């Protein structure tokens, strides 16, 4: 369907398309960006809590140097779907356990640089791995001694699934909202264009034959500005007819 922007209907449709596209673009940018921020904040909080739970379970086996108990705890740890892997190292960075073959068996330079800070502070630290994943690190302290370091790596693919689903929903909503607005514009435009079309045809006929005023009075089909304009033309033509009769 071609839209003639010189007509009222064309201008209303073109304006609706422009406004809807602008509003949707602004809403999409702010909504998706805020969704990404909220999701990232929730994922970081969840990663810290999961790391703390694992640290609490590994205190006893690391303190007793019980490999069987360590294996039992590591395999029994409920690894959430949002975690890619959990690694356990010594305070010096030597790998003890790794729950995923996808993760490297040695610490990166960035991770090794945090070992003194972790051993000194004894608190949870968050960092970015070389693969771009969110990673949490926290020392395992038992009897006041740092027994090991727990490294938890977050799966960004699953973490970004929520904002992606929101984006897909918005993209599905946009065409339906646009079609609904266009239908509404098309329906309302008839109350404006119909009386103007009648008025134009009647005016053209009077121009062609000034003595023929039969098209008037025109029916007032809308109670708006177009209807008032039609009533004014009817009154003007009626007055012209009376003046013409008086002159004759």
Image: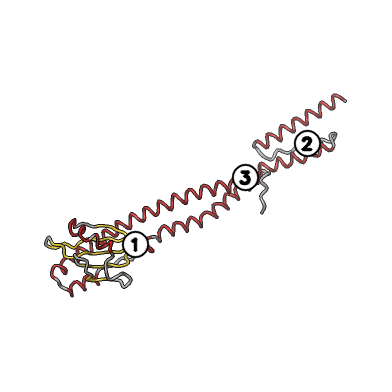
| Circle 2 crowding by C-alpha within 10 Å: few under 14, some 14–19, many from 20 | some
Kindly identify which residue carries mark 3: 12
Gap in angstroms between the C-alphas marked 3 and 2: 29 Å
* On-image quarter of the N terminus: bottom right
Question: Label 1's element?
Answer: loop
Task: Report, in whole angstroms, how far the alpha carbon at label 2 lies from the one at label 1.
Answer: 77 Å
Q: Which residue carries the number 1 mark? A: 133
Dot 3 falls on a residue whose secondary structure is helix
Instruction: Specify the label residue 216 is tagged with.
Output: 2
Quarter of the image for residue 48 reads bottom left
**Residue shown at 85% from the left, 34% from the top:** 211
First along the sequence among labels 1 and 3: 3
Confirm or deny contact between disc 1 and disc 3 (CB under 8 A): no
Q: Residue 137's spot in the image, x, y percent?
A: 25, 61
Q: Position of residue 86 (x, y in %)?
A: 27, 67
Image quarter hosting the C terminus: top right
Which residue occupies 19% across, 65% down?
92
Tell me if residue 161 comes above or below residue 230 in the rendering.
Answer: below
């Amino acid at each position: 369907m071609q839209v003639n922007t010189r007509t009222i209907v064309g201008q209303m449709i073109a304006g609706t398309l422009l406004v809807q596209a602008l509003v949707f673009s602004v809403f999409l940018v702010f909504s998706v960006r805020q969704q990404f921020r909220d999701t990232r904040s929730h994922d970081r909080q969840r990663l810290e809590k999961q790391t703390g739970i694992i640290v609490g379970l590994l205190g006893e086996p690391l303190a007793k140097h019980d490999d069987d108990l360590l294996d039992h705890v590591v395999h029994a740890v409920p690894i959430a779907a949002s975690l890619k892997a959990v690694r356990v190292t010594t305070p010096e960075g030597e790998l003890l356990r790794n729950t995923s073959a996808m993760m490297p068996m040695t610490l990166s330079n960035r991770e090794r640089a945090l070992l003194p800070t972790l051993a000194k502070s004894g608190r949870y630290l968050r960092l970015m791995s070389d693969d771009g994943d969110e990673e949490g690190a926290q020392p395992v302290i038992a009897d006041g001694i740092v027994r090991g370091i727990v490294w938890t790596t977050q799966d960004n693919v699953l973490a970004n699934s929520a904002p992606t689903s929101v984006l897909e929903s918005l993209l599905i909503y946009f065409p339906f909202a646009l079609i609904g607005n266009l239908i509404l514009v098309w329906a309302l435009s008839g109350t404006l264009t119909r009386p103007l079309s009648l008025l134009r045809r009647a005016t053209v006929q009077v121009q062609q034959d000034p003595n023929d005023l039969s098209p008037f009075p025109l029916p007032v089909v809308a109670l708006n500005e177009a209807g008032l304009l039609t009533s004014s033309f009817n009154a003007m033509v009626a007055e012209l007819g009376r003046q013409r009769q008086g002159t004759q």
